[in-house]
Image: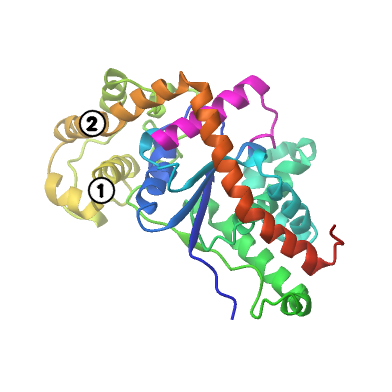
Amino acid sequence: MTSFTPRVFSGVQPTGNLHLGNFLGAIKRFVDMQHSHECIYCVVDMHAITVWQDPAELARNTREVTAAYLAAGIDAKKHIVFNQSQVPQHAELAWVFNCVARMGWLNRMTQFKDKAGKNAENSSVGLYAYPNLMAADILAYHATHVPVGEDQKQHLELSRDIAQKFNNDFAKSIKGAGFSDGFFPLPEPLITGAATRVMSLKDGSKKMSKSDPSDLSRINLADDADTIARKIKKARTDPDPLPSEEPGLKDRPEAANLVGIYAALADKSKAEVLAEFGGSQFSAFKPALVDLAVDKLGPMGSEMKKLMDDKSYIDNILAAGSARARTIAEPIMQDVKKIIGFIRS
């Protein structure tokens, strides 16, 4: 039976203006997982160009995500931190998966429909096919686990489908290459934490996003303490006190969002937060959330700014991480070529 080393892979797109949703939904969990897993963390710059990017901004944003990883506490010596475009095996394997995945599978991807909207005919082929590249990102390292938010679960399911179809399509060749029970693992999702989906501070029904025209809708990781405090104080709420138990948050999206943010920042459950603040008005809860957010995010923002002032340091981190990533991905890609019948020198 094929044995796969337990390994975590995940990545963040370098689209600029990293915010609290990026931190709680991804980066904070990356930091937590490095204590219990072998981790590979990528800045997925190839995904970013599915829509046009200003080249200078793309480079800056790639460094910003890297700085956020490091400032949050990811150890780039023990784990791998790199940018996708420096490891050509991602693109090589993505093409193979373009030939394995079915059109019907991609047509069901809701994120493409959401992003393309009424302009699907004018969208890039890359935007349509990027779930295949996401599968390649994961499977190029035989990753077994992927931390994902609720909005990415469908893409991870596609990765599993692609892995399974490859294993089935090439079963005979895979066994001939010495892999007795499938070549690719079926990666499992890791969905943990109290705030896996952080919502807008101005509208609890919408996801926190850098594209929201109101800067008050989000807390940017680069915000200083005064700005963080101002945004939380202005966050939309309702007139009722906080409930003492989680069912009381139903149909109260803004309250649920702020409680979830507090819980995630404090490493507590929502139930624990409500046990402490149940019955309190938001006039009492918000100052506590301000103190917590400033304590957790303030030092990270300062460290990010410091790192961003040293481009060569970040670039060296990415170069070293990319070299380490290639040492894992290249043998796997060579096995893929052998399995599918490509002649190799």
In the picture of the structure, the residue carrying the numbered disc 2 is: 295
Q: Is residue 281 visible?
A: yes
Q: Amino acid at mark 2?
A: Asp
Residue that appears at 71% across and 45% down:
88
Crowd class of label 1 (few under 14; some 14 to 19; many from 20; radius 10 Å): few
First along the sequence among labels 2 and 1: 1
Here the colouring is rainbow
- Locate the C terminus by quadrant: bottom right
Q: Is residue 5 left or right of residue 194?
A: right
299 over 251 or under it: above or below: above
> Percent from the top left, x then y, of residue 142?
59, 62
In the image, which residues are magenta?
Answer: 48-70
Residue in front for this viewpoint, 149 or 242: 149
Residue that appears at 70% across and 50% down:
89
In the picture of the structure, the residue carrying the numbered disc 1 is: 267
56 over 89 or under it: above or below: above
Q: Amino acid at mark 1?
A: Asp
Q: Which quadrant of the figure has residue 54?
A: top right
The answer for how far apart the CA atoms under marks 2 and 1 are is 13 Å
> Percent from the top left, x then y, of residue 171?
74, 78
> Percent from the top left, x then y, of residue 136?
66, 54
Q: Is residue 66 magenta?
A: yes
- Locate the N terminus by quadrant: bottom right
Residue that appears at 24% across and 55% down:
246
The residue tagged with tag 1: helix, strand or loop? Answer: loop
Crowd class of label 2 (few under 14; some 14 to 19; many from 20; radius 10 Å): few
In the picture, the disc for residue 21 is: none
The residue tagged with tag 2: helix, strand or loop? Answer: helix
Q: Is residue 291 left or right of residue 168?
A: left
Q: Which quadrant of the figure has residue 48?
A: top right
Residue that appears at 34% across and 52% down:
193
> Percent from the top left, x then y, of residue 289?
22, 34
